[in-house]
Amino acid sequence: MNPALDRLARELGLADPAREGLRLRFGHACALRIAHLLEQPDVEQCLQALGEYLAGPPDPTRLRALADEAARLANHHPGSKSIDGCGHAAVSATYAVAKAVEGKALEAASYAAYATVYAQGGAAAVADAESFAPEFAWQVQCLAALANAASGA
């Protein structure tokens, strides 16, 4: 969805198992950016728990359980009852958190971008590719900065 981000991810080898930490940090950053759009406290707690996981000693069992819970919450989100589509922002934000916790950073970024655009302009805005440009640019800058920090550059 974000060609520049996809290109950077390939260059960085983001899909490599050794890059799990970078994927989790980038997904977390994307989800934090849209956290204000979350409607469910349990999803907010999942996002907070991901931050705690990243700050503390790794516990892969805890991360898997957290990913399962975040996916369950996303899959059971009541959806948008808003005719203009602005409610879709909360749905997309919830999926961004779930994908971030799952370590699927590029999917988290896509959902976060949709959440941002829905929140700013409703359903009509997502049809306009230019609506995504600011978020896409931020995502590329964020991933590059996280990768530089991870490499000690």
Image (cartoon, rainbow, N blue to C red):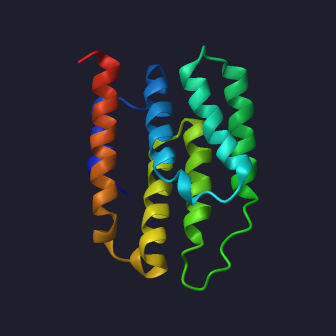
Q: Quadrant of the N terminus?
A: bottom left
Q: How many marks?
A: 0
Identify whether 30 is placed above or below 122. above
Q: Is residue 30 visible?
A: yes
Identify whether 140 is placed above or below 116. above
Nearer to us in this view, 57 or 128: 57
Q: Quadrant of residue 149?
A: top left
Q: Quadrant of the C terminus?
A: top left
Identify whether 89 is placed above or below 97. below
Residue displayed at 55% across by 35% down: 103
Q: Is residue 83 left or right of residue 43?
A: left
Residue reaching furthest to the left? 153
Q: Is residue 135 left or right of residue 103?
A: left
Residue displayed at 60% across by 13% down: 57
Q: Position of residue 46 (x, y in %)?
A: 67, 40
Q: Position of residue 31 (x, y in %)?
A: 51, 46
Residue displayed at 61% across by 16% down: 58
Q: Quadrant of residue 113?
A: bottom left
Residue reaching furthest to the bottom? 83
Residue displayed at 60% across by 33% down: 50
Q: Position of residue 69 (x, y in %)?
A: 75, 42
Q: Is residue 106 left or right of residue 128?
A: right
Identify whether 43 is placed above or below 58. below
Q: Is residue 9 visible?
A: no
Nearer to us in this view, 101 or 2: 101
Q: Is residue 74 left or right of residue 53?
A: right
